[in-house]
Structures are given as structure tokens and as C-alpha cells.
Image (tube, rainbow, N blue to C red):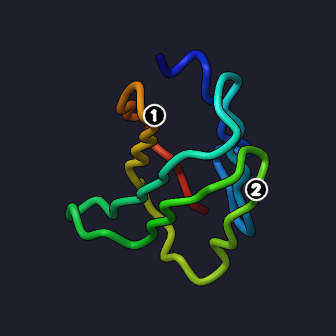
Amino acid sequence: IADNVTVYPNPAKDFIAIKMNNALSFQVSILGSNGALVYKNDQFISGQQINIVNYEPGIYIMKIYNSNFESVIPPLIIK
């Protein structure tokens, strides 16, 4: 499932973009290393960017959902 999702750049400093091959819109959640929700968008458009300038450096967990699946993407590293 994660093969259908591309997150770039990773590691990132200013922004990330997320593309999904088989969906135009989907839900994105980003969790901090402590499990706290730091970002959520229920109508994320494939290719859209997320501004992460104000995020603390560290490792974050991304969850991508659409009507067919939930996917946990490899850790997002913010410098």
C-alpha cells in the first residue's frame, strides 16, 4: 500500500508534498514522536504541500487514509 504513496523530500526542512497514485484526495495525519496529532487534513489533494517550517526537528509518523485503506508511511524526518 505504501508503494502507492510518495512523500518528498524526506528528510525535510521547509515543506513536504504527498502524492498518491490511485486517489485524488485522501486524509493525512501527522503524529509527533510522543503520539500527539500535529497535523490533520481530511481533504488532502494529491501533490499538495504541507508547510513544516514551525515543526520541531525530529521524527514524525504519517498516516494516510482513503476509503480503501490506511497506510503508515515510513517515518518523516524533519531537520
As helix, strand or loop, the secondary structure at mark 2 comes to loop
Which sits in the foreground, 66 or 13?
A: 66
Residue 15: quarter of image: bottom right
Going 43% across and 47% down the picture, which residue do you hit?
Answer: 62
The picture places residue 68, in percent across and down from the top left corner, at: 41, 25
Amino acid of disc 2:
Gln
Mark closest to the chain's N terminus, 1 or 2: 2
Determine whether, in the image, residue 47 is placed left or right of residue 38: right
Going 50% across and 68% down the picture, which residue do you hit?
Answer: 57
The picture places residue 8, in percent across and down from the top left corner, at: 72, 42
How many neighbours does mark 1 have within 10 angstroms: few (below 14), some (14-19), or many (20 or more)? some
Residue 30: quarter of image: bottom left
Q: Which residue is mark 2?
A: 48
Q: Which mark is residue 47?
A: none
Is 22 located above or below residue 36 in the figure? above
In the image, farthest residue toward the front? 67
Which sits in the foreground, 60 or 65?
A: 65
Q: Which residue is mark 1?
A: 73
Is 68 located above or below residue 65 in the figure? above
Q: Nearer the viewer, mark 1 or mark 2?
A: 2
Is 54 located above or below residue 45 in the figure? below
Which sits in the foreground, 57 or 72?
A: 72
Amino acid of disc 1:
Ile
